[in-house]
Image (spheres, coloured by chain):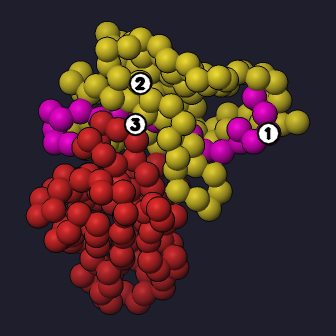
Amino acid sequence: NAGVTQTPKFQVLKTGQSMTLQCAQDMNHEYMSWYRQDPGMGLRLIHYSVGAGITDQGEVPNGYNVSRSTTEDFPLRLLSAAPSQTSVYFCASGGGGGYNEQFFGPGTRLTVL
Amino acid sequence: GENVEQHPSTLSVQEGDSAVIKCTYSDSASNYFPWYKQELGKGPQLIIDIRSNVGEKKDQRIAVTLNKTAKHFSLHITETQPEDSAVYFCAAFGSSYGNKLVFGAGTILRVKS
């Protein structure tokens, strides 16, 4: 099993550009989530999904969109990148909703100029 | 929604000493409390977790205690080793405000040899 994979590992964008961060898992987990990590602020939840076709907002959803068409994939879209979105982004998945271990991907380091 | 506070933000201990990290949560309906360890350049990894029907859990040198009345839980690491140096995150999960896993801001643990 590959676990949770994220692409790309690094990305530099200009303000106003759009892009999609990819996340895939091969553990058949229903629960998937996106976090951003900023210095001194821990991991903040952006969006999460409890199954295909079901998504909901986390603590910091503004500027980000998600969709969940399959169990395996949970892409995160930045519609118009802003410097405030410079961060490290982690995708995670887990079984049994959020009540069990979450497996994190290796992260995507995004810089918005 | 849920709010998790974590202290201290940094902790330095001598090899062989114990380390304690404390977290408080706001939502009395939260019932799952995991601890994650993040090494440099990697995604967080679960090290131990506790559910609300248990007051204490131990796994070798690591233990977690939960006080539901006071709404706080703590991570205890005994006989610390240099490889324990990392960032540690606590988290709380409950369904009263949606199925959200909310993290604390993290503690940087340095074990000096």
Report the Cα–Cα distance between label 3 and label 2: 11 Å
In this rendered view, identify the residue nearer to me: A25 or A1. Answer: A1
According to the image, label 3 marks what residue? B91
State the mark number for residue B82. Answer: 1
Q: Split into 4 quadrants, where in the image is the N terminus of chain B? A: top left
The amino acid beneath tag 3 is Ala
Q: Which residues are magenta?
A: B80-99
Q: Quadrant of residue A48?
A: bottom left
Residue at horizontal 52%, vertical 56%? B43
According to the image, label 2 marks what residue? B50
Residue at mark 2: chain: B
Q: Split into 4 quadrants, where in the image is the C terminus of chain B? A: top right
Report the Cα–Cα distance between label 1 and label 2: 25 Å
Q: Are marks 3 and 2 in contact (CB under 8 Å)?
A: no
Residue that sits furthest to the front in the current view = A1
- Letter of the chain shown yellow in the rendering: B
Q: Position of residue B63 (x, y in %)?
A: 57, 21
